[in-house]
Structures are given as structure tokens and as C-alpha cells.
Image (cartoon, helix red, strand yellow):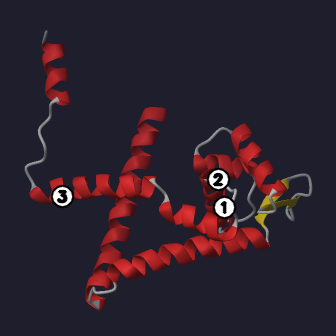
Amino acid sequence: MTTATNTREVEASPLPEDENLLRIGQVMTRMRLMTGRRMIGRLAIQNVAPGLELSHLDVIDAVRRAEEAGEVTVGTIADILRIDPSRASRIVAEMVTRGVLRRKASQADARRIVVVLTALGQRLLAEIQAQKFSVIESIIADWSTEDVEAFSLLFDRFVGGYERVFQARIKETDG
């Protein structure tokens, strides 16, 4: 009986009393809905490589991020995107066929195959970034320099904190 009552209490937990927490939560939901539609990615595909899918853009971004740390394998892509390696392999194969990615032997270990962006992949990445910056610039066009600087620092701090909390909770559930 007590367990059922406690469960109902958790399920029916009230909204935060702090207006700021409530606003942040509501804004996060709005932003998730907007980014979930992935308009920037859709525009980039339309402008540079019609026929690609949004999952291809995820792989391009994973390659871009992983390249900073070294060579990128299909396994690296699967880990970053948190998808099955066989699915990552199929997506990479499609992208190789479409000329967005290229496979090559690792410089560190010739037995390993790594993935790199082709010129088309680089163009697509540049277009995605151009679309993103264009949207951001139009949003902040009438903001003061101080507001832009403060927001960029606070937004980075917020998202960094969000990532740390999320990763910690994943580790708790996995381990």
C-alpha cells in the first residue's frame, strides 16, 4: 500500500515552484521540438546533396568530432551515435557509395580501416555550419554584444552541465 502511494506521489510530482526552473524546462522542450525537426540539416541537404538522409548528417558530425582525437573507425562512429556497429557500418557504406565518405588504411595500423570526409562531405559540413550560423545570426541580430557574449558563455555552461549530468546518469543505469 505504501509503495503504491509513493509511486503515485512521484508520478504526480508538482511543477517546480521556482519560476526560472519552470521557464528553463519549458524552453528546453520548445528547443527540443524545434531541433527535432532538424530544419538546418534539411536545408543543408537540399542545397548540397539532395537524396541524403538526416542520419547521414549525424555520421558526418560524428566523423568531424572524432577526427579531433585521431583516426575515425566505424566503431568510433557507432559509439558516438550510440547505435549498433552493424547499423553504423551500413550508413557508412551508403555514404561511401554517395561520395560523402571514403575508407582508407589507417596510418597507425595498416590493418585497420578508417573513415574520412571527401570533398563533398566537407562541402556538406560547411553548408550545415553556414546554415546554423545564419540562423543564429538572425536570432541575435538585435542583441547587444554583451548579451551575445553572456548568452554564449551561459549556454555553453548549461549544455556542458546537462551533458555531465546525463552521462553520470547513464553510467548509473549501465553500471
* SS type, badge 2: loop
Which residue shows up at 27% across the image and 85% down it? 143
| Alpha carbons under labels 1 and 3: distance apart | 33 Å
Q: Is residue 175 visible?
A: no
Q: Give residue 88's quadrant in the image.
A: top right
Residue with the mark numbered 2: 53
Disc on the earlier residue, 2 or 1: 2
Q: Is residue 147 visible?
A: yes
Three-letter code, disc 2: Glu
Residue with the mark numbered 3: 23
Residue 17 coordinates in the image, percent (x, y)? 7, 49
Which residue shows up at 33% across the image and 81% down it? 140
* SS type, badge 3: helix
Q: Give the quarter of the figure containing the N terminus.
A: top left
In depth, the one of 6 and 36 nearer the eye is 36
Residue with the mark numbered 1: 60
Which residue shows up at 30% across the image and 52% down it? 29
Q: Nearer the viewer, mark 2 or mark 3?
A: 2
Residue 136 coordinates in the image, percent (x, y)? 41, 76
Disc on the earlier residue, 2 or 3: 3
Three-letter code, disc 3: Arg
The mark tally for this picture is: 3
Residue 26 coordinates in the image, percent (x, y)? 23, 53
Residue 7 coordinates in the image, percent (x, y)? 19, 22
Do callouts 1 and 3 mark residues in contact (Cβ within 8 Å)?
no
Q: Residues within 10 Å of mark 2 (few under 14, many from 20)?
A: some
In the displayed structure image, the side of residue 166 where residue 44 appears, left or right = right
